[in-house]
Image (tube, rainbow, N blue to C red):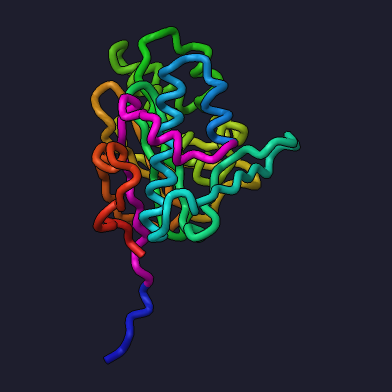
């Protein structure tokens, strides 16, 4: 019997949590640099989002690598500026090397995406009803602005944040983040399936897969994976894991 040479489809796990799950036990999982940054946030809500997001990332990497969460380390890499302090997209190291993660949070949503191999970008945005004119000119291309201008008033804010979440997910997947420029990439309209229409610049990937995610009616979320499609996606609730962070994660849903 012959062996198929067709590669298995890429897989990504997305875990959602709430900032209200923040606790002293989660802070114990963070390293010294993370705890220092956590302490610098002025607003309690920002501290809670940070603690939940970074503890969850460590717990998920530990579950994937079958190790203690404190054995997981993250390397911060940015190839786009010369700031001396470590910053940029976190990449798991130590026992979890080879896995890829992306962290996002907005309002009452905290999310972490995890994959084995291909880089991922996850973004969630809370829909805010406000004057969007300045943000539109910063984030959207001429063609995207034309689509948004044609939308009904009640569709304008949700449409804009659909655009934003898709674009930021893509830029996070490449490691550029917002420094890559939201207008460097153009995506399909809010009422169309998520797709990349064009991408300018040397950092544009040769292959990328993009999809929208359901994060609740007041949010827009998107996932980008630097792989040929299709990509299988499993969505999980992280509440139980965060409530008992020192226990073993149990059966691991990750695809190896």
* Location of residue 41 with respect to 209 vertically, above or below: above
Residue 208 seen: no
The residue under the point 55% across, 48% down is 74
Quadrant of the drawing holding the N terminus:
bottom left
Residue 77, horizontal then vertical, whole percent: 63, 45
The residue under the point 38% across, 31% down is 124
Quadrant of the drawing holding the C terminus:
bottom left
The residue under the point 33% across, 42% down is 245
Count of numbered circles in the view: 0
The one of 182 and 169 positioned closer to us in this rendering: 169
Which region of the structure is painted magenta? 7-32
The one of 19 and 218 positioned closer to us in this rendering: 19
The one of 114 and 28 positioned closer to us in this rendering: 28
* Location of residue 19 with respect to 7 vertically, above or below: above
The residue under the point 44% across, 46% down is 58
The one of 69 and 90 positioned closer to us in this rendering: 69
Residue 13, horizontal then vertical, whole percent: 33, 50
The residue sitting at the bottom extreme is 1
Residue 20 lies in magenta, yes or no? Answer: yes
* Location of residue 96 with respect to 195 vertically, above or below: below
The residue sitting at the top extreme is 131
Residue 29, horizontal then vertical, whole percent: 45, 41
Residue 55, horizontal then vertical, whole percent: 42, 39
Residue 245 lies in magenta, yes or no? Answer: no
Residue 38 seen: yes
């Amino acid at each position: 019997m012959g062996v198929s040479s067709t590669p298995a489809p890429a897989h990504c796990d997305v875990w959602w949590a709430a900032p209200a799950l923040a606790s002293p036990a989660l802070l114990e999982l963070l390293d010294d640099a993370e705890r220092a940054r956590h302490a610098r946030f002025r607003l309690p809500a920002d501290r809670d989002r940070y603690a939940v997001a970074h503890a969850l990332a460590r717990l998920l990497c530990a579950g994937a690598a079958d190790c203690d969460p404190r054995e997981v380390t993250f390397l911060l890499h940015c190839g786009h500026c010369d700031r001396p302090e470590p910053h940029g997209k976190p990449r798991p190291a130590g026992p979890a090397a080879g896995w890829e993660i992306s962290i996002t949070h907005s309002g009452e949503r905290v999310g972490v995406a995890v994959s084995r191999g291909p880089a991922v970008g996850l973004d969630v945005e809370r829909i805010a009803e406000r004057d969007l004119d300045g943000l539109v000119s910063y984030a959207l291309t001429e063609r995207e602005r034309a689509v948004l201008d044609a939308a009904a008033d009640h569709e304008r804010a949700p449409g804009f944040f659909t655009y934003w979440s898709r674009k930021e997910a893509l830029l996070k997947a490449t490691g550029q983040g917002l420094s890559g420029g939201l207008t460097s990439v153009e995506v399909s309209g809010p009422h169309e399936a998520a797709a990349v229409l064009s991408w300018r610049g040397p950092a544009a990937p040769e292959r990328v897969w993009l999809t929208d995610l359901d994060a609740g009616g007041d949010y827009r979320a998107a996932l980008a994976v630097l792989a040929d499609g299709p990509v299988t996606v499993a969505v999980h609730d992280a509440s139980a894991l965060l409530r008992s962070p020192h226990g073993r994660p149990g059966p691991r849903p990750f695809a190896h």
